[in-house]
Amino acid sequence: MKKIDAFNHIWPKPFFDALIGHIGTMSDITKRSGDVPMMTDLDRRFQVMDEFGPDYCQILSLASPPLEKIVGPEAALELSRIGSDSMAELCQKYPDRFPAFIATAPMSHPDGMVSEAKRAIEELGAVGVQIFTNIGGTPVDLPDYAPFFEYMNSVKKPVWLHPARGANMTDYASEAESQYEIWWTFGWPYETSAAMARMVFSQFFDRWSDLKVITHHAGGMIPYFEGRVGPGWDQMGARTSGRDLAAVRKALKRPHLEYFKEFYADTATFGSKAAIRHALEFFGEDRVVFASDAPFDPEGGPMYIRETMRILDSEDFTDEIRRKVYHDNIANLLGLTL
């Protein structure tokens, strides 16, 4: 059974060299990425991939941090171009290992967010575009970003939604920064969920009926909080006196819970079988895709791949569900024939 890893990360050498040229030294999440050999060492990546046999392959995407967080708009455009060019080259050179790549849109560049997505998809063959759950601290549903989503809807290519949050997003108002990396452990699932909610209630899917969004880490918090998201938000407006939020919910063409179920989710859950089961139950077996989040595990690459496969292979899922998650769902979504 072909296993297509739909959300893992790489820094190709041309991109890594350009990144260091802009930022000088790495720190925080950037240093964490750069310290993992599999991120930049292709031989090490191949060694890890070989552990899982010839049926395992990867759709490549760049790793955190968001470009708009570390450089200005023009540099973000430059880095996104280098990233797409170098990933496209890897796909051409090693098609059996890397059947496709995901571009990264420079969302801080007013023109580049669309022009680079268009170039990557229509000239380089990118199967979609990665964005982050906030753009330099601004929400994804600002009108400034609408042209990007309009384009992605028009070409019917999915948006990969990656969480972004740092220690500057505090856990308590009295503190200057988040402690104990709570900003990552709980903050990233919250980021994903908040961005999904902004998309739903800003009527993304009413405006752009062909828009497809793949959420990292099994849809963040949404599957676990179906009751709060569904019946809880049926009462939207009852807790707020300064704005008629009931009108926001009623303006949707369908019940809001239906829109949340239209997102796609991946299996990158760090070895949690419960999270994978929740994702399958909430989004449905046709909207969950295999992904590992490699190489960000304690072993520097193989652990999350191995543990995700172990869960999918050992739990009482049918072979049909396994085939959908491992291969069919992402292949059908992207039009891949492997």
Image: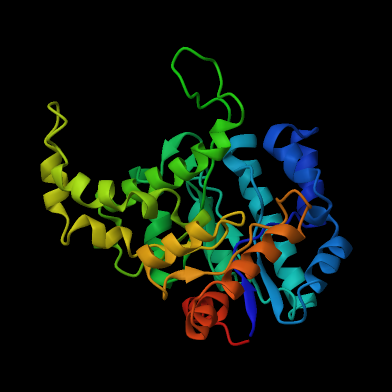
Residue 278 position in % (x across, y down): 42, 60
- The quarter of the picture where the C terminus appears is bottom right
Residue placed at 75% from the left, 48% from the top?
Answer: 298
Residue placed at 52% from the left, 75% from the top?
Answer: 325
Residue 60 position in % (x across, y down): 67, 64
Near-viewer residue (47 or 117): 47
Query: Quadrant of residue 306 in the image?
Result: bottom right
Colour setting: rainbow
Residue 36 in the figure: left or right of residue 144 = right
Near-viewer residue (63 or 92): 63
Near-viewer residue (110 or 239): 239
Q: Is residue 66 above or below residue 130?
A: above
Residue 201 position in % (x across, y down): 25, 49
Residue placed at 78% from the left, 44% from the top?
Answer: 34
Q: How many marks?
A: 0
Q: Is residue 232 above or below residue 281?
A: above
Residue 215 in the figure: left or right of residue 42 = left
Q: Is residue 124 above or below residue 31?
A: below
Q: Is residue 290 above or below residue 106?
A: below
Mark yes or no: residue 132 visible: yes
Near-viewer residue (74 or 13): 13
Residue lying furthest right: 43
Mark yes or no: residue 14 visible: no
- The quarter of the picture where the N terminus appears is bottom right
Residue 90 in the figure: left or right of residue 127 = right
Residue placed at 34% from the left, 49% from the top?
Answer: 225
Residue lying furthest top: 174
Residue 140 position in % (x across, y down): 40, 45
